[in-house]
Image: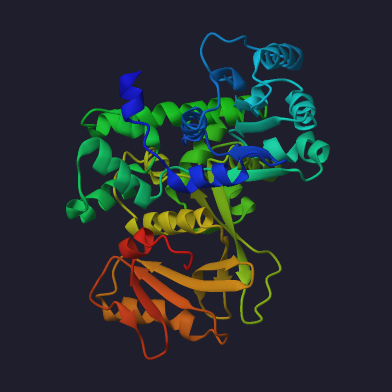
Amino acid sequence: MEAAMRNRIPRPHYQQLLTRYRDTEFVKVLTGVRRCGKSTLLDLFIEDLHAQGVPEENVFRKRFDEFGLPLNPTAEDLQDEIAAALDCADPSHMFYVALDEIQMVSEWERVVRGLHTRSGVDVYITGSNAYLLSSDLATLLAGRYVELDVYPLSFCEYLEFSSRIRGKSDAALNTLFADYLRYGGMPSIFALKEPREEDIARELTGIFNSVIVNDVAQRFQIRDYALLEKLVAYVFSTSGNLFSVKSIANYLKSAGAKASYETIDGYLRALEQALVLHSALQTGVQGKQLLRPLRKYYPVDTGLRNLPGGFSGRDVGFQLENVVYLELIRRGFNVSVGTLEKGEVDFVAQKRDVRHYLQVVDSLVDTATYERELKPLCMLEDAFPRIILTLDCLRVGTTEEGIHIVNLIDWLRDQSEAL
């Protein structure tokens, strides 16, 4: 327990969000891929409650993914437990309910709705799939909920964890980023003592299997598990490329798999529902019209992305794209792939009325690469910011065309409200 407490590193961004919505009428819904840190965030929040004088009997906390619990917990059982806890609570304080992996309880929506209508009760739930809010809950609550998307560690958080747990400072910044790029930011890898690659692989394999088996195959009743594994291996290893469902199905067919369009489409949707895979839709810019837009797929963590390939370190450019895409959605941007008449912009990031165009490249030292990355941005005619993110420092600055060249690591560390 003491070791677990030592490894419970604060994640201020999420903790501030929980504090902001504390004691409001909204049900707080934390969603994110399995093992990304949702449970720990609730633990930290509850610690803060107790530190501020909330009695222990005024907090009901239950995890439905713990070993030893009934395999099929029911809404009635949960209601009875909470009712008993309410009877023992101090009525002069708010009563807090925190339910982890609530989707494992049949008809859980009724319980949450009932709690929400009760005065003096503040409700927090977590789940490992997007189904949580595509279910009846959204209808039952009629908009009286707030969804908080939780992701694996950002690079800033990764640096904080490395400093607190392993004593590594920013002096080893490039080495730390290389590790982050290769092994990802799943918080549980910091529970490993002096982790070797095989230890990290074992930990990530456990997470990967848990997600694919529990949150994808079982939840969506997928029978052809071998096909699902082949699909995941292919999409993960080629993430960052533009695809259609048809092209993916055709590739798997050519590899000997029985893969119809409908099956692959369903499997991809299941992976996105399990929050282990995200996608950026191709969109036309500067008047370009797309009849059949393609997609780029990005795993939720670069460690999980690189796991099937044995952390080979190949295709660094696509890995960097993966990191940038995740950081953009972490910062609240809607992200698409920009397509022009001639050329492509890696990302079009939109938040309300603000838009940014971004290119991502490992190095701009080569003149041909520099000109290739610059060209699509020079074709844009609006006044929104145009940015190239690179690991280089040599060309950092603003070009004659007004294009900002920014060191990617510096950009990841900049947590200001601006991009």
- Quarter of the image for residue 136 reads top right
Residue at image point 49% right, 35% down: 41
Asked if residue 180 shows in the view, the reply is yes
Q: Quadrant of the N terminus?
A: top left
Asked if residue 224 shows in the view, the reply is no
Q: Is residue 75 above or below residue 414?
A: above
Q: Is residue 95 left or right of residue 416?
A: right
Residue most toward the left? 171
Q: Is residue 314 above or below residue 131?
A: below
Residue most toward the front? 92
Q: Position of residue 299 (x, y in %)?
A: 48, 46
- Quarter of the image for residue 369 reads bottom left
Front-lying residue, 348 or 154: 154
Q: Position of residue 19 (x, y in %)?
A: 55, 43
Front-lying residue, 152 or 238: 152
User: How many numbered badges does the structure rendering display?
Assistant: 0
